């Protein structure tokens, strides 16, 4: 009967590696795992049942924590992560933390207990200490961090760009809707916009809003009751922008003549709004892909030079902003 | 030192129940589990480490399979499931099957191996045989089944209602966009609409479309190129309706004067479209809640009289349909 040594020899790896693969403790590279699997099959090697079940069950499972699956930005992120992971034979399970720390902690616990071998988190919680002593690699997504690997888009540029485009299109009284600023990316986005507006010496007001659907309508009404003369809105995200657009229609405002609006994210729905929403595009799907790639490298134990990957944002010109007349 | 018998006595349950709780094999009711947990703590009972880790890790985990998290209908379902599960102390992990059987099978395997104690599936696959021999309870969501417990909304009524509302508002050339009809609910929806249109003797055309975002724009263009005279659209869902509305604007059609549109689902975004979308509302969040409730009952081993729960749909009148003048 074949022994673990025979398997190791045939697969061309150490006994420790075979043991690691069989016991599901620690990460084993995909190719190595395939070799071991093949050797086991060819030699008809039988580890005991418990070990075998662990071998089958562990070590292909990745956890993903999303803050709010109802916001279409996050399913886009998730799809990017998922497609990359699937191409590499990993399985992804998703936990929706609902922007609550308690639920987030709960999911981390669940993932640990179910032997995930890597975690991607798009947490929106300010504190991240619960990610400090994980036994598997972690990548933060849609947020920055000094301590942890992360993939995020350039919020400072995004905020700046939104302000710049409105100013260049003649807005004189701009409302900046500031999202919840627990995360550095959201703070950056706000800072970018405000810096640009200061520099341009344009009047602006600031209102703090939520990012969520259920409250977007409320904030849109608040906005026009507080600042009825506003002629430009920098929305905290596309969901809020959609609500502002809706409310503006209700008040009989002409878009973009009376009021210009810029969203943030470029979720799939934004193109179907009327007028179609001009927005700052975060490459959500690509961010997901990049985070997955980075995590896979980390799980492979590869040396990673740049653990904080910054992706560019981009102004998507649609019709809630005026055309700039450049050649007239 | 306390024994398992002491724990059973103190908790007022059988040794078998305590063993089941500790070994994470089979379901133990929440209240019973709490009593056992308390008894264990009071008596300072120590099961061996493996058993304890199983006690902690197993038996609170529920799997949810969604067909497409990018369609906002499904995150709504998921939130309903999640809220109900959370109130009962369960944890929910989500798998996105991407409308692919292979991914769905993969998730079922993953859930099995991670010891979920119950599964809710919103599968869109025609074949369901892979759900036949699970070792834990299953509830199908957003689809009907004779063999399995299920929670779904009344597609027949929904289709009928959509047709009726367009006919009563004067549409003479209706386009029925038929979604992918792998599932009985989608077939019912289509049948309801067509039956009603036959009965009313109104001209109609049928076009088969996808439900997905990425393709919605294509179908919208196809629609108006094939049936330029259509004056009423029964869309397969709200995503497709949004694309049709967008394309109608592009073609300069007046809504609802030239063209009336009815969606299906009532996703959160529909209220923010312009004009706001009239649609058939499926109570997604409540469907999720009901599915969770049913699953919990099944996991409790309770006798369930009605294992196929049908929820009503409702016409949400917004502004893509004309006002009916009733008293003029």
Image: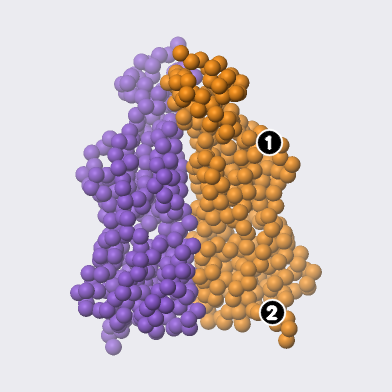
Chain colours: A orange, B purple
* Relative image position of residue A99 (x, y in whole percent): 55, 49
**At 27% from the left edge and 44% from the top edge, which residue is drawn?**
B148
Which is more foreground, mark 1 or mark 2? 1
**At 23% from the left edge and 47% from the top edge, which residue is drawn?**
B146
Which mark, residue A324?
A: 2
Could you confirm whether marks 1 and 2 are on the same chain? yes
Q: Chain of mark 1?
A: A
**At 44% from the left edge and 61% from the top edge, which residue is drawn?**
B212
Which mark, residue B273?
A: none
Asked which quadrant contains residue A199, the reply is bottom right
The residue lying toward the viewer, choosing from B257 and A46, is: A46
The residue lying toward the viewer, choosing from A290 and B265, is: A290
On screen, residue B171 versus residue A171, left or right, reads left
Q: Which residue is mark 1?
A: A302
Mark 2 surroundings: few (<14), some (14-19) or many (≥20) residues within 10 A: few
On screen, residue B78 versus residue B293, left or right, reads right
Q: Quadrant of the C terminus of chain A?
A: bottom right
* Labels 1 and 2 touching (C-beta < 8 A): no
* Relative image position of residue B202 (x, y in whole percent): 25, 79
- Find numbered disc 2 in the image and state the secondary structure of the residue it sits on: loop
């Amino acid at each position: 009967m074949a022994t673990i040594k025979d398997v190791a020899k045939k697969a061309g790896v150490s006994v420790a590696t075979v043991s690691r693969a069989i016991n599901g403790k620690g990460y084993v590279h995909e190719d190595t795992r395939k070799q071991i699997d093949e050797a086991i099959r060819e030699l008809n090697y039988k580890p005991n049942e418990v070990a075998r079940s662990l071998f089958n069950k562990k070590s292909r499972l990745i956890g993903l924590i999303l803050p709010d699956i109802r916001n279409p930005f996050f399913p886009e992120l998730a799809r990017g992560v998922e497609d990359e992971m699937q191409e590499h034979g990993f399985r992804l399970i998703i936990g929706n933390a609902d922007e609550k720390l308690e639920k987030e902690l709960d999911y981390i616990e669940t993932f640990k207990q179910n032997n995930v071998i890597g975690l991607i988190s798009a947490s929106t919680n300010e504190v991240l200490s619960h990610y400090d002593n994980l036994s598997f690699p972690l990548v933060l997504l849609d947020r920055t961090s000094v301590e942890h690997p992360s993939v995020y888009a350039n919020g400072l540029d995004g905020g700046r760009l939104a302000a710049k485009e409105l100013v260049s299109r003649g807005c004189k009284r701009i409302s900046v809707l500031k999202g919840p600023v627990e995360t550095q990316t959201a703070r950056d986005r706000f800072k970018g916009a405000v810096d640009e507006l200061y520099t341009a010496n344009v009047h602006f007001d600031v209102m703090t809003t939520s990012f969520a659907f259920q409250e977007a309508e409320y904030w849109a009404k608040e906005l026009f009751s507080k600042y009825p003369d506003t002629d430009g809105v920098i929305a905290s995200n596309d969901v809020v922008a959609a609500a502002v657009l809706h409310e503006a229609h209700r008040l009989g405002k002409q878009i973009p003549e009376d009021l210009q609006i810029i969203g943030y994210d470029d979720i799939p729905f934004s193109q179907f709004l009327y007028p179609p929403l001009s927005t700052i595009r975060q490459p959500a799907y690509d961010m997901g892909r990049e985070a997955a790639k980075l995590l896979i490298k980390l799980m492979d134990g590869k040396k990673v030079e740049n653990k904080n990957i910054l992706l560019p944002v981009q102004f998507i010109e649609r019709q809630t902003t005026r055309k700039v007349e450049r050649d007239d």
